[in-house]
Structure formats: structure tokens, C-alpha cells
Image: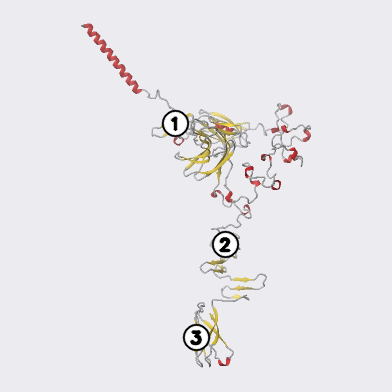
Amino acid sequence: MSSFNLDEREKRKQFASYFKELEDRIANLERANQLNNASIEGGALDIYDDDGLLKGSVGVQGDGTVALVPEPQNTDPPPTPAAPTVDSALAGLDITWSGQWADSEASPADFSLVQVHVGTPADFTPNAATQVSQINDVTGGKTTVHIEGYDPVWVRLVAVNTAALTGDPSDAVQGQARQAVGQDLVDEMITEVKLAQNAVTTAKIALGAVGTTTLADDAITTPKILAGAVTTDKLVALAVTAEKIASLAITTDKLAALSITADKLAVNSVTATAIAAGVINATHIKAGAITADRLAIVGGNNMLPDPSFEGPGGAALVAGQTFWTITNAGNGSSKSVQVNAVNPNAVIRTLTLATFSILPGQQLRLATDVNPSTDWNGNSVRIYARWFDSAGGVLFGFVTNTTPAKGAWSTMAGVVTAPPGTVAVEIRLATYDSNAGTVMFDNSVIQPVLGQVQIADGAITADKLDADAINGKTITGSTVQSASGGHRIVMAPSGILYFYTGAANEYSPGRIEPKGSDTSLSIWGPQTDSAVDYGLVLKRIGASTSAVLNTDSTTFVGDVKVAGQFSAKNMAWGSVSITPSANADSSVTITGVGLVDASSYRVFLTINSGLPSVLRTPTATDATADGFTLWLNRSTATATNVWWFMIAK
């Protein structure tokens, strides 16, 4: 009996232990990370902060790479680096960053690099043109940069995070490149024994340093002549004849401006397709040949320091890139930047050229040369702007070519405008929705476009206008005058022509004014400050006399001759026939004369008759502006013609 009880207790103990083990395992499962055995298959995982704001993504990105990518719109810019330490170096500066921050105790986790900028004056604004180097270590570092000349310059640092956002620039620190001695080289300092073998190359020999007497006969053969080394001023007249020039030896880049004139060209020998991009500049264009409607006004230089990707600037753009490289082929240059567009699915692959601040409404001219490979397949090639507003919103301005020539260079260009609210812009190259081949880009351009409001007042003066620039053009809404003051003629927008005498007491100028209401032309004399008319002079060229309209505006002084009929609104004349009763006063009324209103009217009458003895003098009564009544008395009832002349006074 006791043995049985012992077995039961042992079983209960085992059961309790097993139950406790299950309970512990369940608790461990509840506490365990549920993603221990999870993976991301063919996509990316979005990362949000506690407020639900998208901060970035991790996994396979749109360009096919696997990376942790922050969201630029929702990413804070990095803090401001501490001011650098600047030490003089031979023909340059040693620039050191301590790894400290001016406005942060700790280094940011989201860190890409620190840009090094050099410029003048102390408050210069860092941009793509002022960047001379970069420091990639978040703990600090040192870089040595070359400085042109020995004038003082200022150094500022700008931090960049992985979202390509830049922070505020550091305080500026002054530096100055160091010379070895008071001048770089003392006269006769370098002798022949100081030169290493092959130390002196053609690039190191000054123009004119080696004369013909220094060279042995036949010492220089064509393979020994550097391209561009022999210019026209180095040749004796007629030394180079046609048979001395190999086929295709002279290309456009070997010709000096204006060396080929129109009389040297056959008719129609130069067509638009035969002119390479950029070979025609202002010195080749006749004055007045390009009018305003043919111009897109672009101001300033190309904002890209290395537009052909041949130097350190181009190398820095592709540093760390997977699909973008520098290739040894270009359009008129030795290199270009190339993107690999191969991917199982259509993909967008972009390269950032520059990022800088910009104001709404400002315009940029974007251009680049493109050369897709013959097997390239995609939607388009592009150079475009990504516009950022203060809230991180992004809009786009594209210059796109959907059908670029494959296996050949072509140029794409256009103007994009910053939309309202824009504070910054990023310029990119792109192969868009492509899956095969490669694309080369070269000679990229970012230039600001000048609007009318950016042309300073008075910048365009008369000597800048071609003689025919405004010939035959209609000028509206403006005043045209022969001088800015004094004696002058002014044509007003109203169509009135004003004549200023230049007199000190001139109150109102003379004028010629067309009157549309009664289709008349009025001529007004000038007035003094007391509103007294000066008068109006009518004079024939070459004549010694003239007709002067006095200041009372009523009297002509001098002789006035009229070739033809003279008429006035205060005079009228005509004739009337009247048959009177014999030996009785008879009358007829004349109406419709239409004289001006006056204080009195005078009528002059003459009888047209060959029998004056039977006539008595006619008279007139009731004279008004409209007419009068004529009275006649004769001994016979005979029709009689009477001439009349009427004056309003």
C-alpha cells in the first residue's frame, strides 16, 4: 500500500514538472521576436516613426540595388560642422575637420560626408562651383587642396546625409597658400643638372622659347607635333599649300574664328547638318542677324564645374555608384559618364549632377549630349529637375527624348521653371524605364535663364541697337521724344504731337491734335506761364515774309495768299432771282446760309442788269446766321438777278 502511494506521488511530481515546462515554453514564445525566421523577398520594407511618418526603406530599391534609403522629404538635414582648422601649404591649404559639430553634441547616425568649400568673401554661399574636396569620415579628417594664386581665401564646411540633404555651412576660416620663397622660382634657380630625365616635355616649354636655330634639320616630324601646337602666326605666308594637307587633317576645332570667310565657300557648301554644336559663336554672327524673337536669354556660366566628366568632379559624381561609371569616350572630349541599363525588369537609374537653392519662378536651361548603345531599350533618356518645397514636397521638370538616335551622339535641351513654393532643386541624368544596353552622357549644362525683369534699367542703350532693329516696328504705349528736355518734339501715346520751345516760362507746348469726332486737325500755339498765347507763324521755305497769327489769336500780320478758293465760317455769298411788282416794293427770303453766331451781320447786294436806269437800289433786312430778306423795286415786273455777299461780325 505504501509503495503504491509513492508511485502516485512521483507521477504527480513528473506531471507538475511537465506542465511547468510547457508554461515556460509558451511564455518564451510570447516574448520572442516574431521576425527571427522572416525575410524580404524581392521588395523593400518601409520604415515609419512613432507618428506614422515614412522615414525610409530597406531592401531592393527601384534601381535594383539593395540598400537602406532614407526618405528625403521626411529626413532632417545634418547638423553644422565645427569650423575647420586651416594651415598654409605650398601653393595650397591643409584643411582639417575635428569631427565635432557646432550645434550638436553627438555625431548624426545619418551621415554621408562633409563638403569642403573655398571662396571669397567670408560670407560666400557654398555651391557646386566652390566645392574643392570632401571628408568622408564622421570622426573627422584632413584634406589638402590646391589654391590658385596667393590671395587670402575663406574655407567653410557643409555636412551631407545619405538623403543628399545639406546642412548649414560652418563658420568661415581664412587661409592663404604658401610660397616657397618671395617668388615661386628665383632666376637661374633650376639648372640643367637639376632636371630629371624626360622632366621637360612640350607642355613645359614656353611659346617662342625654342627657335628655328635651336633645332636640327628634320628634327621635328609630324608625329612629334602636338595638336594645336602650330598656329597660323607661326607659319610663313604660303608655307602650307593644299598638297601639304592630308585628307580630313583640318577639322572645325583646328580653325581660328573668322579664318574662313564667305568668299572662300562654295554656294550651299555649308548646311545646318554640317555645323557641329557650339562651333558658331558671337564673333561669327553678323550684327542684326539675330533678332529678339530668336533668343532665349541665358545668363552666367555653366554651373557644372566638370560638364564633360573628365576631371575630379566627374569622378566624384560616380564614386560609390553601382551602375554609373566614367568611360573613355565622349562627344568632342575624351570621357563621358555612362549608365548600365541592363535589368530583368524596366528600371529607372539616375545620377545626381548638382543640388542648390532656387526661388519660385526662376528658370534653368538644362542640356546634355546623349548616346544610347544600339541595344539600349527604354522609355526615354532625360535630364531633369527635382523641385523641393519647404515641406519636403517634390515636383519635376523634365527635358526628355523618347526616341534618341542609337549608336550616335545627339543633343537634348530645354528650359524648366521652378514652381510656386520651391526652395531647392536637384538636377539628375536618367535612363527611364529601361532594361537593356547602356547610355553615355556628355557636355551637360545647367544655366540660369534671365527674364525681362532681370535686365537692369538702362542696360540696353541706343548704341547696342542695330540700325534696323526697330525699323518698321509699331511702338505702342510709349512716349517718343527727340530730347529729354528743352527744345524738343514729343509724340505721346494719345497720338498728339507736342512742340516744346524750351522757354523758361513755357506753360503749355504747341501741339498738333487730330480730332476723330469731326475728322479735323487742330494746330495749337504754345502758352506762357500766364496762359498767354505765343502765336503761330506760317512761313514758306526761302521766303523773306511770313504770316503771323498774333497772340490775340485773331489777327494775321503780313500777307496771306491763297491759291484757290478761300472760305470762312463767317462769310457766305450767292445769287437770287426776283420778279417784283411794277413800281412796288417786293421781297424774297434767303435761308440756309449757315454762318457762325455773331453779334451782327452785314449784307452786300449788287443787281445784275444792263438797264440801270429802270432799277432802284435793293436792300436787305432781318439778317441772321441763317439768312436775310431781300427787297427790290423797279418800274417793270421783270425777273431780276441779284448777287449777295454776307459777313458775320
Residue at x 56%, y 73% (from the top left corner): 553
x and y percent of residue 303 in the render? 57, 40
Identify the mark nearer the N-term, 2 or 1. Answer: 1
- Residue that numbered label 1 is attached to: 57
Helix, strand, or loop for circle 3? Answer: strand
x and y percent of residue 378 in the render? 52, 35
Numbered label attached to residue 491: 2
Helix, strand, or loop for circle 1? Answer: strand
Residue at x 61%, y 50% (from the top left corner): 290
Identify the mark nearer the N-term, 3 or 2. Answer: 2
Instruction: Measure how far apart labels 2 and 1 are at the Cα level.
Output: 69 Å
Instruction: Out of 457 and 163, give the one closest to the viewer.
Output: 163
- The kind of residue on which mark 3 rests is Val
Q: Residues within 10 Å of mark 2 (few under 14, many from 20)?
A: some
x and y percent of residue 26 in the render? 32, 20
Q: Quadrant of residue 565?
A: bottom right
- Residue that numbered label 3 is attached to: 588
Helix, strand, or loop for circle 2? Answer: strand
Q: Are marks 3 and 1 in contact (CB under 8 Å)?
A: no
Of labels 3 and 2, the one closer to you = 3
Location of residue 32 with respect to 243 vertically, above or below: above
Location of residue 553 with respect to 253 vertically, above or below: below
